[in-house]
Image (cartoon, rainbow, N blue to C red):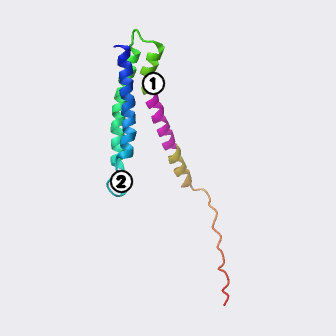
């Protein structure tokens, strides 16, 4: 494999990642109720799956580059590292919000609301 192949696969990865976000923004949310918007998620994830395949290919080609410079290897490794960081952030944010929701429903003692007497009627 050549240096040009690493750059080409990395460019394909970048195009697929950009296409996933563009498709997410342009796809209308269809269906009703609980499943509304899941079609948008499936379009996004299908483009991301293609980008993952390109990222792995870029990593493998960059790793096995015999005559590549450090920059070429970095370009080969960047797509997979960027995808790993992106999904780590998504998982961390999801876990954080799930833990917030779980802590809101704990058996903690909640203060009782005070009742306010109605204002006197003046006639």
Element under disc 1:
helix
Residue 81 shown left or right of residue 9 in the figure: right
In the rendered structure, are the residues bearing label 1 and label 2 in contact, judged by CB atoms less than 8 Å apart? no
Q: Residue furthest top?
A: 67
Residue at image position (64%, 73%) is: 115
Q: Is residue 20 magenta?
A: no
Given residues 117 and 84, the one toward you in this image is 84
Question: Which quadrant, please, contains the C terminus?
Answer: bottom right
Residue 111 shown left or right of residue 95 in the figure: right
Q: Label 1 belongs to which residue?
A: 78
Magenta region: which residues? 80-95
Residue 75 shown left or right of residue 106 in the figure: left
Horizontal and vertical percent position of residue 81:
46, 27
The rendered magenta stretch, by its main secondary structure, is classed as helix
Residue at image position (63%, 68%) is: 113
Q: Which residue lies furthest to the bottom in this view?
A: 123
Given residues 42 and 95, the one toward you in this image is 42
Q: Is residue 91 magenta?
A: yes
């Amino acid at each position: 494999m050549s240096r040009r192949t690493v750059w080409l696969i990395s460019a394909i990865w970048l195009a697929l990642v950009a296409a996933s976000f563009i498709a997410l923004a342009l796809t209308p949310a269809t269906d009703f109720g609980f499943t509304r918007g899941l079609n948008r998620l499936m379009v996004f994830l299908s483009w991301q799956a293609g980008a993952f395949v390109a990222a792995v290919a870029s990593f493998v080609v960059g790793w096995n580059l015999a005559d590549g410079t450090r920059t070429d290897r970095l370009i080969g490794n960047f797509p997979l590292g960027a995808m790993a960081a992106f999904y780590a952030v998504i998982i961390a944010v999801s876990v954080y919000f799930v833990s917030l929701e779980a802590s809101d429903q704990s058996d903690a003692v909640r203060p009782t609301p005070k009742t306010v007497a109605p204002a006197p009627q003046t006639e």
